[in-house]
Image: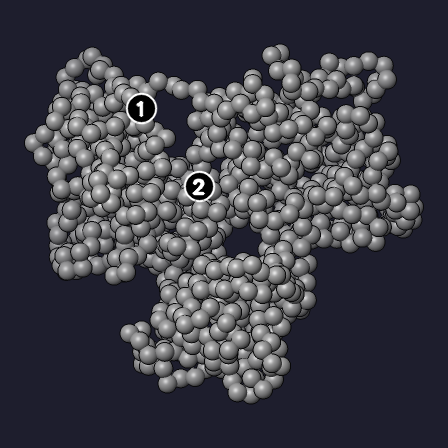
Amino acid sequence: MATRKSEQSPSSDALTAYRDKRDRRTTTEPFEPERPVRAEQQTWAGRFVIHQHAATRMHWDVRLQIGPSLLSFAVPKGVSLDPAEKRLAVHTENHPLSYLDFEDVIPEGNYGAGAMIIWDTGSVRYLETSAEQAIVRGKIDFVLSGFKVQGRFGLILTYKSKLKLPGQVSPLAEPRNHEWLLVKKPDVHADPARDLITLLPRSVMSGLTVAELKSPAGFRAAALALADERGARRFDPARSPAGNAPPMVCALEGAPLSSPDWLYELKLDGVRIIAQKNGESVRLRYRSGLVCTTNYAEIARAVLALPFEQLTLDGEIVTFDERGRPNFGLLAPRIAARKAGDVARARNDVPVAFLCFDLLSLEDRDLRALPLMARKEILARTVRGNGYLSALDHIVERGDALWALCEREELEGVVAKRLTSTYQHGPQAGGHWVKLKRAREEEFVVVGRTDGKGNRKSLGALAVASFSGPDLVYRGRVGSGFTDALLELFSARLAELETSEPAIIQVPKLELKGLRWVRPELVVRIKFSGFTNEGHLRAPVLMGLSEYKRPRDCTVAPTEEKLQIEVGAKTSGEEAPAGKVQRAVVTQLGTSRSASLVLTNKGKIFWPDEGYTKGDLLDYYSRVSSVMLPFLRGRPVVLVRYPDGINGKNFYQWRAPEGTPSWLRTQELYDEEKQEARGTGKSTFLIDDEDSLLYVVNLGCIPLHVLGSREQTPGHCDFLTIDLDLGPRPFREAVLLALSLHEILDDLGLSGFPKTSGQRGLHVLVPLGPGQSFDAAKLLCELLGRLLVGKHPQVCTMERRKDKRGNKVYVDTGQTGRARTIVAPYSARAFVGATVSTPLEWKEIHLALDPSVFTIQSVPERVAEQADPLAGLLEERPNLRVAVEKLSLWTQRLPG
C-alpha cells in the first residue's frame, strides 16, 4: 500500500465495531491486533476485495484498503459496468486487512452467517484526493484493477446521509450505515451490455459459486466421477503419486504446427510450478524442486481452497504487462523475495495468476496414465475459476491459428501436445510435448560483469555461461533488457559474488576487456535467436533472474557441441576432465564484543525445500534477539542440534562441549531425584547476550529448549506450561481449548501467555511469580488440565499413553518440572517451512489462525512492527493460594 505520512497522533482503533459484532470462538472470520487510525494518514493506493455474500439476503461487499483496515460497503445488486447505473452501497463496519483473503462459510448463529466467496480482488488507486480526504467530503474517486472488474469508479455519499453527519466527522471512524451510491465512470472498460454478476459467478479464489462453497459435495463428486469414467487408477492416499518428481519436459522440435492428433496451447512466459495439496497443507515447487510456497502465498491459498483433500497440478505462474501479455521479467521481485516484508511488497506490486495445464492426481486417483485429453477434461471440472487459478485454454488441430495470434501479439510461441500422451516425469517425454517458440529463451549462469557508462554506470553487461558436460563454457555477454529494478537487484547481488578467478574453462581474449569475474551462483533467463559459430548467444536480451533454477542445470549449448559431448561419452572410457571447482569458503559474520565468536558454513542448506541456509538461521536469531534474550537471560538452555540441517541426524545436548569459550557462561545442573546429593555433570549454557545466542546456533542448534527456573533460584518455578498437542486433530480445536483455558485463568485471577508450538499445537505459559516450588507448580498445572478436560471431555484428554488417547487433543501438563524443558519462545523449529514458536496476543487466537505463517522469514518483520506479546510474563505476581483453592473446589465437582 502506498501511504504518505506526516506527524500523526493516534485516534480510535478502526476495527472496534468489527470485533464487537463477532465472537472469535464461533466465527471463522479473521481477527487482527489493534491498529490505530492515524488522524493525518493519507492513503493513495492499496488492495480491494469484492465478496459475494449469501447472508440473510444475497449481496456483494465492496471493501477498499484505507490505512490499516478495509472500508466496507454492502451493495445489494453488485457492481455494474453501466455508467448510467447508480447502485446503492451501504457503509458497514471496517474489516481487517486479512479479510482480503477470506473465503468461507460463516457458521449459523454468527453475525453475517452464510457462504462468502471472493468474487473479485486486485489493486485500488485513489484519484484527485487521498482516500481519507475523499471520505470526509463524501466523494471517493478510484480505479480498480482486478481479475474481473477494471476501470474508474466512484462512491458518492447520498444527500440524506450527509444530513445525518455532524459537521466533518468521518464515517471511517464511526460507521453508522450511511448510504452511498456506487457508479461506474465512463472509460474504455465501461460496457452497459455486459453483466459481470451473471457472466462470472465464480470465486477468483476457489472457483466455486456461493452455493457450491456451502455444499461442495456435488462439485467434488462430478470431478471424481469423470476421473473414474476415464479409467483413473487408485493409489494409497497417504503417498502423493508425483512425490518430488520433476515435471514433464518439452522437446524443442518434432511437432507439426497443425494436426488433428495434437492440441496447442500458448507458450507462457512465466515460471513452471507443481502445486501439491495434501489435507491442510499446500506446497508449490519450481521445476528444479525448490519450494517457493511463501513467494506465491495467494496461489497456495487458492489451491488450498479447492474442495479436495489431495491433488497435484502442473502449470505456470505468470504476471501480465500493460498489454495483457505474460512477462517473465516482471516476475523478478516475486522470484527474488526472501524476507516477509519483501514478499508482501512484491505481492502488492506484482499480481500473479497460476494457469494450470495438467492434473496429475485427484484425491486417490492417479491420472498420469490417462491420455492428455482425459486429464484436460478432469482439470476443467476441478479448476473452474478465472482468477488466482484457471485452466489454460487450448485448441485442437489448428496450431497455425494460435501461431498467427502469437505473431500478431508478439507472444512467446506455442506448445504442441499429443492428444494421447500420458504424463512422463522429467526430460524423457519422447517428443510428446514440443515447444514451438518465436524466439529461443533459456537459462544461463552469470560468470562476470562489466561496468556501465552514462546513466548505466552501475552495470554494463553480464557475462554468461552454460555447462557443457562438467565444464562451464562462455556464451557471451548480455547488455539489453535491463529495467531499473533489475539493475538495482543485480548490482547488489554481484557485489557480494566478486572473485579474482574465472569459473569458465577457457577465457576468450577478445572478451576480457572490462570483465570482472563473479562466482557462478546466479542464473538468468535470456531470450536469443540462436548461437554464433563461436558458440556465443546471438541477439541476447535479459528477461530476468531465475532463482528457481540451479546453475548446474543450465546446459544449453549449440546442437553441434551437444552431439560432440554425447559421441565422446559413448566412445571414450575415460572420465571427462573436471571443470573448475569452487573452493569452499568459511565465512564470518564478524566478532561483536567477543573476539572468539566465529560463525562458519553459513552457506550450508538447513531447509532443503525452501533453500534456507545456516546463515539464514543465524540472521533470524540475530534479528529477534531483542525479544528473545529477556526470556533466556540467566535461564539454563538445552540445545537440539542439527549439524546437517533438518533432514540430517539430530540430538539433544545438555552439556557444553569442550572448547566452549570462557566468555560464554554455563551452569552445573543437578539430578531431579538427587537434587541435594550430587551433580550429574550437566553443565548447560546460559544465554545472556546476542554473541552467546549466535555461538550456540552456530553449533547447528535450531530450536532452544529452556528450563522453568533461573540460575539463582534452581528450585523455584517461574511459569508453568500447558501444551495443547493436537495429533491428527484440526488446529481449530487447539484454538477453542486455548480460549476456554483463557476464561478459566481469568476466573482464577491468573494470566496466560499463548504461543504457537512451531509445529501444529499451542502452548500457554502461566506466570507464577517468585519463590514458587516446582511441586506447587505441578499441582496447579495438573488441576488446570483436569478442569479443561472436564469442560471438554469429548475433545481432549490427559492420558499420557498415545494408544489410549483415541482421536483426542492431548492436554500435556507434564512439561513443568525441575528437569522438564519447553521450546523457548521465538525458537525456530526443524520442520518444513522453517516455522517458529511465536508468542501471540489473545486477540490473535481465533478460528482462522494459521500457525504456518510464522517462519524465520516473517517473524522478524512482526517483531519490528509490534510489541512483544510475552513482555511482562516474568513480572506477574499472581495470588496462587486463592487460585489453587478455587481450582480444588471446581475439580472436586468434576465427574470421575
**Disc number for residue 241:** none
Q: Residues within 10 Å of mark 2 (few under 14, many from 20)?
A: some
Residue 210 image position (x, y, % from top left):
49, 68
Question: Is 223 on the left or on the right of 842, as rendered?
Answer: left
**Residue displayed at 47% across by 53% down:** 301
Residue 781 image position (x, y, % from top left):
81, 40
Q: Residues within 10 Å of mark 1 (few under 14, many from 20)?
A: some
Residue 816, can we see it?
Answer: yes
Residue 11 image position (x, y, % from top left):
63, 64
Question: Is 156 on the left or on the right of 260, as rendered?
Answer: right
Where disc 1 sits, the SS reads loop
Residue at numbered disc 2: 338
State which mark lies toward you, 2 or 1.
1
**Disc number for residue 499:** 1
The residue nearer to you, when weighing 373 against 290, is 290
- The CA distance from mark 2 to mark 1 is 24 Å
**Residue displayed at 73% across by 13% down:** 681
Where disc 2 sits, the SS reads loop
Residue 218 image position (x, y, % from top left):
47, 63
- Identify which amino acid the numbered label 1 is placed on: Thr
Mark sitting earlier along the chain (2/1): 2
Residue 823, can we see it?
Answer: no
The residue nearer to you, when weighing 307 against 441, is 441
The residue nearer to you, when weighing 271 against 541, is 541
The residue nearer to you, when weighing 695 against 706, is 695
For residue 68, above or below residue 698: below
**Residue displayed at 15% across by 36% down:** 537
For residue 12, above or below residue 767: below
Q: Check contact, mark 2 vs mark 1: CB within 8 A.
A: no
- Identify which amino acid the numbered label 2 is placed on: Arg
What's the colour scheme?
one colour
